[in-house]
């Protein structure tokens, strides 16, 4: 049940990002659900490998390269789905930052007393 709530919360966060940034478009709530699921899969399967491979660059930039990596993951998910469109690289980076912020806020609001 908690997984489904987190999935719905991430879809709502993606819709909020699309509402605030005109360069990011989500066709429908169903597209947002698919995009949230794909973002979760990409971030859980591909991101750890990429973080490990880009560790020297991340250390040289004092961790700022992780923003670029998050933007690339966001852009990858948008390129794989038809109802989710990102206008460019910088739109993907700023969209990924907003998506992370909104997702964290919504998830903390949905957290129960024992998870806080």
Image (cartoon, rainbow, N blue to C red):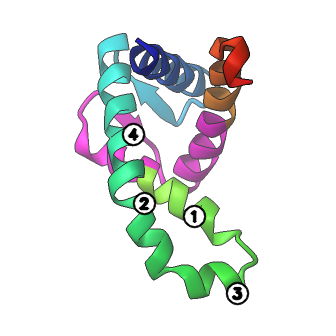
Q: Which mark is residue 68?
A: 1
Q: Is residue 80 above or below residue 103?
A: below
Q: Is residue 20 above or below residue 74?
A: above
Q: Earlier in the sequence, mark 1 or mark 3?
A: 3
Residue at the spot x=76%, y=77% of the render?
62
The secondary structure that most of the magenta stretch takes on is: helix
Alpha carbon separation for disc pair 4 and 1? 17 Å
Label of residue 40 in the image: 4
Secondary structure under the numbered disc 4 in the rendered image: helix
- Magenta-colored stretch includes residue 85: yes
CB-based contact (under 8 Å), mark 3 and mark 4: no
Which mark, by number, is residue 60?
Answer: 3
Kindly tell me whether residue 107 is visible in this rendering: yes
- Circle nearer the N terminus (2, 3): 2
Residue pictured at 52% horizontal, 63% vertical: 69
- Marking on residue 25: none
Q: Picture quarter containing residue 95?
A: top right
Q: Of the residues under marks 4 and 1, which one precedes in the sequence?
A: 4
Tag 4 or tag 3, which sits nearer the N-term?
A: 4
Q: Nearer the viewer, residue 49 or 69?
A: 49
Q: Secondary structure at mark 2?
A: helix
- The x and y percentages for residue 89 are 51, 57
- Element under label 1? helix
Give the labeled residue for mark 2.
47
């Amino acid at each position: 049940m908690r997984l489904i709530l987190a999935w719905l919360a991430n879809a709502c966060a993606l819709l909020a990002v699309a509402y605030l940034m005109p360069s990011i478009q989500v066709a429908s709530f169903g597209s947002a659900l698919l995009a949230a699921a794909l973002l979760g899969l990409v971030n859980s399967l591909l991101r750890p490998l990429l973080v490990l491979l880009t560790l020297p660059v991340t250390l040289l930039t004092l961790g700022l390269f992780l923003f670029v990596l998050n933007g690339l993951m966001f852009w990858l998910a948008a390129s794989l789905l038809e109802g989710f469109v990102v206008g460019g690289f910088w739109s993907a980076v700023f969209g990924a930052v907003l998506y992370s912020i909104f997702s964290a806020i919504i998830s903390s609001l949905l957290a129960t007393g024992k998870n806080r």
